Image: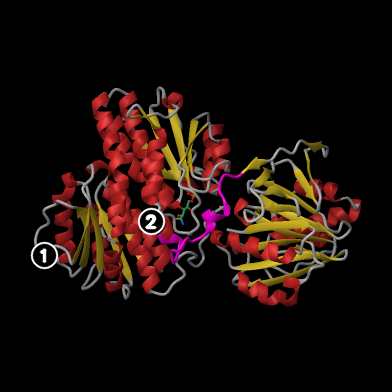
């Protein structure tokens, strides 16, 4: 989603902004722009499309050594088409802002401002916020006062950086529900919506709190509290380095990140094992009667799969729900309920809102989060980090696999603590989990087979994915992955549900990819395969290595290395991801940055 970088310092600003915006590309965007000081005059340059287009529009300005302060933005369109007119910065000759988030009451604000003589050039909500600040700045000539008065009228979410013409080489930043960091460096100071934008320069940063305003120039970063007085500015240090944002010889981030799965799964499992058993801080789950897993997209699919395993090993009922539904449903939460929020970014707007709702309703909350210090991690009562490292490709792969690993470990832990699993059984499951990274590695080694299979289906209009139980949950994820990066229509279906409607879409040559790692349900799934084959479907079957597969049931079979059956989906996720990856490559698409998608969905 949108990205922000700002810099004021002794160096030329444009390379810093352009490189910073490039580092934010992975978040997804469709236009970009900059505002900078030329003397005490604010100038903007914007363009639709990729950062290359912005660079072209900037021309010689890219090299201009005299421009040392500016703000840059990548926009993921919400209000108004992706065009240079709608791209940020927005504002006036005296105030120019870049904004991440959504100003919900922009219609009302525009009416208020129109009454004061303002007109609007774009279709964006941001322009209303910019002109509101300008209006108050016109009255008081004081930037902090203007921000505070405007902020009192803004509804919605925002991270904003602003330039004021009366204050050259100074940048103001403030936020609500969207992250914004101030980062110091000896050559100057930065604002960034995501540390990735400045990792090439510094790993130190200060997260802004919701009621603060930060002001930076080439020498200082000052943070003002709600009362306008300066507050202590203690910097944190990011553990990731710039290397984590490199492809390291892989053609794409998505493939690199799938290749990293054995290492990150291994790391995650080992980090929570003590004396052969998983060891989470389990105070949270004492007396848990129900678990609600709430998340979006891939993270929700991990939750769907985790439900089967947690219920089976612990006997605790688990309910899984999309955060965007949960937050508006008036969920009924009992005293003994735990709400588990799963999120790679920890910044997903709906997941964050669901977390806040759960807390307001008095539920205990646990975040399973990848990004350290993200909003979900900070606001949940407890947090388990998935430690997958930076995930750059928009399509989530290694983060999903590690989410599964954490849920499986949690299932063993809950089963053990509830007394449903004896010590020996719990330890045997842990042993089995420790073997998973090896199996994942072997699976990855078969990537050329996945490439060849994907090649056969590049002309497909639709692909159906089906399975039962854990394999149904994996089918949902496999379908999402494939549609995200290949733009082919895909559906994930519970195999037993096929004949209740979707089978009407099966005709000669329609591909059905089947996951069948749960041996107990294999025969049932075979019956469903026969039903679709009878109607002409071409079938790709993913099943366990030793499974006795009836002759002629599938066009292609991908066998996953032998593992504990209950956790086999963690291995089967690899071909699901690889099939999507190669399909996208064969179709010549931008696999790491699929159209219209954002890595971190910070708006509703
Ligand atoms: O950062 P989160 O895990 O909260 O993100 C949730 C979804 O937006 C995300 O999983 C999305 O579905 C991915 N693009 C999937 O590949």
Magenta segment includes 251: yes
What span is colored magenta in the figure? 238-255
Asked whether 161 or 121 is in front, the reply is: 161
Residue under circle 2? 259
Helix, strand or loop for disc 2 = helix
- Seen at 84% across and 56% down, the residue is 135
Relative placement, left or right, of 207 versus 345 is: right
Does the beta carbon of the residue at mark 1 sit less than 8 Å from ligand 1? no
Q: Position of residue 98 (x, y in %)?
A: 71, 59
In x, y percent, where is residue 275?
A: 34, 26
Relative height, residue 121 to residue 203 (above, below): below
Q: Which tag, 2 or 1, sits closer to the chain's start?
A: 2
Distance from label 2 to label 1 (Cα)? 32 Å
Q: Magenta stretch: dominant SS?
A: loop
Q: Residue placed at 42% from the left, 44% from the top? A: 321
Q: Quadrant of residue 228?
A: top right
- Which residue corresponds to mark 1? 552
Tell me the quarter of the image containing the N terminus: bottom right
**In the drawing, what numbered circle is on residue 132?**
none
Q: Residue 3 occupies which quadrant of the picture?
A: bottom right
């Amino acid at each position: 989603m949108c990205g922000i970088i700002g810099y004021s310092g002794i160096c030329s600003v444009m390379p810093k902004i352009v490189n910073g915006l490039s580092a934010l590309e992975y978040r997804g965007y469709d236009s970009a722009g900059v505002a900078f000081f030329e003397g005490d005059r604010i100038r903007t340059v914007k363009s639709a499309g990729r950062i290359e287009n912005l660079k072209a529009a900037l021309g010689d300005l890219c090299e201009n050594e005299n421009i040392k302060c500016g703000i840059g933005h990548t926009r993921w369109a919400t209000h108004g088409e992706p065009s240079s007119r709608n791209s940020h910065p927005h504002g006036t000759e005296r105030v120019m802002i870049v904004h991440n988030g959504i100003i919900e009451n922009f219609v009302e604000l525009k009416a208020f401002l129109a009454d004061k003589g303002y007109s609007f050039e774009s279709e964006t909500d941001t322009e209303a916020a910019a002109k509101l600040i300008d209006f108050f700045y016109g009255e008081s000539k004081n930037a902090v006062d203007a921000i505070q008065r405007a902020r009192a009228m803004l509804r919605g979410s925002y991270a904003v950086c602003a330039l004021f013409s009366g204050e050259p080489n100074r940048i103001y930043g403030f936020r609500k529900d969207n992250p914004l960091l101030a980062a110091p460096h000896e050559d100057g100071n930065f604002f960034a919506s995501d540390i990735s934008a400045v990792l090439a320069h510094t790993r130190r940063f200060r997260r802004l709190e919701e009621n603060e305003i930060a002001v930076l120039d080439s020498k200082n970063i000052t943070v003002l509290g709600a009362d306008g007085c300066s507050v202590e500015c203690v910097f944190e240090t990011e553990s990731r380095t710039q290397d984590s944002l490199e492809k390291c010889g892989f053609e794409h981030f998505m493939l690199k990140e799938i290749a990293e799965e054995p290492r990150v799964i291994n790391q995650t499992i080992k980090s929570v094992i003590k004396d052969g058993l998983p060891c989470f801080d389990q105070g949270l789950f004492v007396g848990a009667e129900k678990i609600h897993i709430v998340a979006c997209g891939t993270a929700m699919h991990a939750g769907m799969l985790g439900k089967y395993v947690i219920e089976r090993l612990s006997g605790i009922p688990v309910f899984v729900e999309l955060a965007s539904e949960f937050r508006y449903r008036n969920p009924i939460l009992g005293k003994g309920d735990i709400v588990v929020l799963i999120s790679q970014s920890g910044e997903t707007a709906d997941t964050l809102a669901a977390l806040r709702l759960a807390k307001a309703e008095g539920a205990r909350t646990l975040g399973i989060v990848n990004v350290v210090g993200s909003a979900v991690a900070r606001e949940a009562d407890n947090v388990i980090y998935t430690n997958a490292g930076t995930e750059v490709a928009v399509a989530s792969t290694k983060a999903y696999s590690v989410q599964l690993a954490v849920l499986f470990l949690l299932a063993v832990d809950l089963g053990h603590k509830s007394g449903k699993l004896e010590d020996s059984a719990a330890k045997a499951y842990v042993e089995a989990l420790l073997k998973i990274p090896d199996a994942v590695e072997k699976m990855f080694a078969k990537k050329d087979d996945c490439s060849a299979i994907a090649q056969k289906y590049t002309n497909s209009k639709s692909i159906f994915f089906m399975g039962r139980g854990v394999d149904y949950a994996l089918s949902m994820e496999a379908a999402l992955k494939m549609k995200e990066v290949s733009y082919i229509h895909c559906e994930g279906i519970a195999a037993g549900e096929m004949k209740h409607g979707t089978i009407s879409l099966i005709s000669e040559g329609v591909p059905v990819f089947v996951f069948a790692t749960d041996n107990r349900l294999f025969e049932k799934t075979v019956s469903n395969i026969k039903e679709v084959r009878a109607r002409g479907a071409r079938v790709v079957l993913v099943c366990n290595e030793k499974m006795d597969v009836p002759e002629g049931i599938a066009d292609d079979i991908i066998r996953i290395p032998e593992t504990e059956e209950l956790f086999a989906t963690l291995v089967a996720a690899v071909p699901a991801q690889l099939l999507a990856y190669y399909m996208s490559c064969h179709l010549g698409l931008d696999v790491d940055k699929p159209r219209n998608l954002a890595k971190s969905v910070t708006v509703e």
